[in-house]
Amino acid sequence: MEKFEKLSGIAAPMPMINIDTDMIIPKQFLKTIKRSGLGVNLFDEMRYDADGKEIPDFVLNKPAYRNAEILVAGDNFGCGSSREHAPWAIKDFGIRCVIAPSFADIFYNNCFKNGILPVPLPQDQVDILMEEAQKGANARIEVDLVSQTITTSDGTTIAFEVDAFKKHCLLEGLDDIGLTMEKASAIDAFEGNLSVSRPWV
């Protein structure tokens, strides 16, 4: 998993509440078990019309936000079903950080397992970042996981909280498999001892 330490990028504003996982990646795209290739279908039903053409007014179709790496959204982001394809699609599009007043628990935890930093903040602070995001390519937001701060283009700094273990995993690029592999030597030693003490297993 790609490490997350510091990110400086364009933030896309999506001031909608209750953006659920079916809006993030509709059910017809859940057949794949690959984590790549879903970015093109991120927010599919809002990005494209019935003929598959881009809807110009949708934020990620606007030239200023096509390369957005940060998403500033409304309350209860990632609600709905627990599909892990949702963070896969967000990451594959290129977004590494989502900022919102609150997140659905399963989506929130899935983000950390896929190299995405979800940042819950009070509404007044989200409003500041939403206004900043509306400046488009003229403003870049910096997210520093080490110092746990978000800095706007005019120097305004907002501190955020993050669980120490989840922070460690992102900084080191450790998903569940990576965490297991950190114990590889202990696992090898256990299996070696087991083969000696219980050769019939």
Image (cartoon, helix red, strand yellow):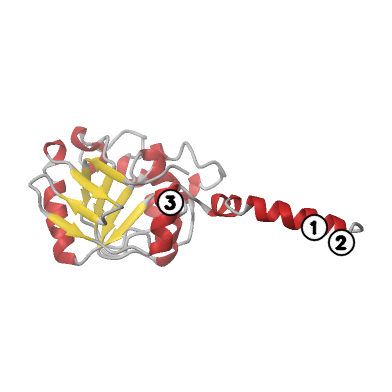
Please indicate whether residue 125 sits to the left or right of residue 161 in the image: left
- Whether label 2 touches label 1, CB < 8 Å: yes
Dot 2 corresponds to which residue? 197
> Could you tell me if residue 41 is visible in this image?
yes
In depth, the one of 180 and 134 nearer the eye is: 180
Q: Earlier in the sequence, mark 2 or mark 3?
A: 3
Residue 101 image point, x, y percent: 25, 64
In depth, the one of 83 and 168 nearer the eye is: 168
Distance, label 2 to label 1, CA atoms, is 6 Å
Residue 23 image point, x, y percent: 37, 53
Distance, label 3 to label 1, CA atoms, is 42 Å
Q: Quadrant of residue 191?
A: bottom right
Q: Check the image and report above or below for 127 versus 25.
A: below
Farthest residue to the right: give it: 200
Q: Earlier in the sequence, mark 3 or mark 1?
A: 3
In depth, the one of 194 and 35 nearer the eye is: 194
Residue that appears at 48% across and 61% down: 82
Q: At numbered mark 2, what does the secondary structure look like: helix, strand or loop? A: helix
Q: Quadrant of residue 52?
A: top left
Q: Quadrant of residue 96?
A: top left
Dot 1 corresponds to which residue? 193
> Could you tell me if residue 107 is visible in this image?
no
Please indicate whether residue 12 sits to the left or right of residue 165 in the image: left
Dot 3 corresponds to which residue? 86
Residue 54 image point, x, y percent: 29, 35
Amino acid carrying label 2: it is Ser
Eye-nearest disc, 2 or 3: 2
Amino acid carrying label 1: it is Asn
